[in-house]
Image (cartoon, rainbow, N blue to C red):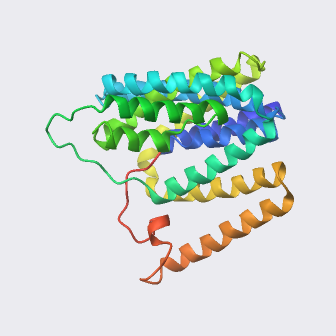
């Protein structure tokens, strides 16, 4: 199972490299249900994986000038405080509750990936940085990251674009700095009460990094918009599995059935002009920049 876990971690990394984020949402289920870790160990280990892969991904963005350091460090510092608090708070929350929260995060992430992000163009003017808002947003996003182990890139990117006034490519690059900072802080919070298998954690992290480098090279060969939407549907399906495991089989089946119905309706949206899901899934809407 360890070999299978490490092998699948490569595919998680490929998703990270292709999408610029989002693949980390698969790390917790991989560690919990394939590697056999308990919920808190899986979340703590995923924070290590997310932190390292995000930091490495940020290097290429920084070299290309796509990182706004002042905004990123302010947001990241607030996120670290929230993430550490979340990691410490997790000791008082049952693992099952944390995994259910993680499943809800998966659903939110999937919807965000299906919708995509509107691009934000640079205006050429100086944008006054709303520091109190960025700190508040960083604390909230960091708290969620620390509790459930998800990087929260789909929350960080729009916050940086809207509150920080950053163009989307810069928001994406800056978000990786923020995600790395708060992931390591969340890990620190968890380590106050949770012991992790460091040899397995480092092996999974290394595999994810290799996969991320492979995925980055494949980016130019695969339609990112189609990939993002396919990944969003896959994450929705995975959330149904967690709900079935942690709540009740019937809940998981109901969630899977709802996903199937939504998928069929989305397919219908490609053939009919009037579709109620068009605003949710983005079908028929011009492609947007992939979300994290």
Q: Is residue 101 above or below residue 65?
A: below
Q: Quadrant of residue 12?
A: top right
Foreground of the two, 228 or 255:
255
Instruction: Residue at 46%, 24% (x, y): give it.
Output: 78
Query: Where, by quadrant of the figure, is residue 170 drawn?
Result: top left
Q: Is residue 67 visible?
A: no
Say above or below: 201 vs 111: above
Left or right of 5? Residue 120 is: left
Left or right, 278 with respect to 87, comes to left
Q: Residue at x 68, y 26 (%)?
A: 89
Please name the residue shown 45% across and 45% down the image: 219
Residue 93 image point, x, y percent: 76, 33
Q: Outermost residue toward the left?
A: 125
- The foreground one among 84 and 281 is 84
Q: Is residue 127 visible?
A: yes
Is residue 184 toward the left or the right of residue 101 in the image?
Answer: left
Percent from the top left, x then y, of residue 118?
35, 54
Which quadrant does the N terminus fall into?
top right
- Can you give x and y, in whole percent of width and height, for residue 182 in the image? 53, 25
Residue at figure coordinates x 54%, y 73% from the top left: 266
Q: Quadrant of residue 130?
A: top left
Please state the total of marks drawn on the protein image: 0
Expressed as whole percent of the image width and height from the top left, the position of residue 177 reads 44, 26
Say above or below: 280 vs 218.
below
Up/down of 119 relative to 203, above or below: below
């Amino acid at each position: 199972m360890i070999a299978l876990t490490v092998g699948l971690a490569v595919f998680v990394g490929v998703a990270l490299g292709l999408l610029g984020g989002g693949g980390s949402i698969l790390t917790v289920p991989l560690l919990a249900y394939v590697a056999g870790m308990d919920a808190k160990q899986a979340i703590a280990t995923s924070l290590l994986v997310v932190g390292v892969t995000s930091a490495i991904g940020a290097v290429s963005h920084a070299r290309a000038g796509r990182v706004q350091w002042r905004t990123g460090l302010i947001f990241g510092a607030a996120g670290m405080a929230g993430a550490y608090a979340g990691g410490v708070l997790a000791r008082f929350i049952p693992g099952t509750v944390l995994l259910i929260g993680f499943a809800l995060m998966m659903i939110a992430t999937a919807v965000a990936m299906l919708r995509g992000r509107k691009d934000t163009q640079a205006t050429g003017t100086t944008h006054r940085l709303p520091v109190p808002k960025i700190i508040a947003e960083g604390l909230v996003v960091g708290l969620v990251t620390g509790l459930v182990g998800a990087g929260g890139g789909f929350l960080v990117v729009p916050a940086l674009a809207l509150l920080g006034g950053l163009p989307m490519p810069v928001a994406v690059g800056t978000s990786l700095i923020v995600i790395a900072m708060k992931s390591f802080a969340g890990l620190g919070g968890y380590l106050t009460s949770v012991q992790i298998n460091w040899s397995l954690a480092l092996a999974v992290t290394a595999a994810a990094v290799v996969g991320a480098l492979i995925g980055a090279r494949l980016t130019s060969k695969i339609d990112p918009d189609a990939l993002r939407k396919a990944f969003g549907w896959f994450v929705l399906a995975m959330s149904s599995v967690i709900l079935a495991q942690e709540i009740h089989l019937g809940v998981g089946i109901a969630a899977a059935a709802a996903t199937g119905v939504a998928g069929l309706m989305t397919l219908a949206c490609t053939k009919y002009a009037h579709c109620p899901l068009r605003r949710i899934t983005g079908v028929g809407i011009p492609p947007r920049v992939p979300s994290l």
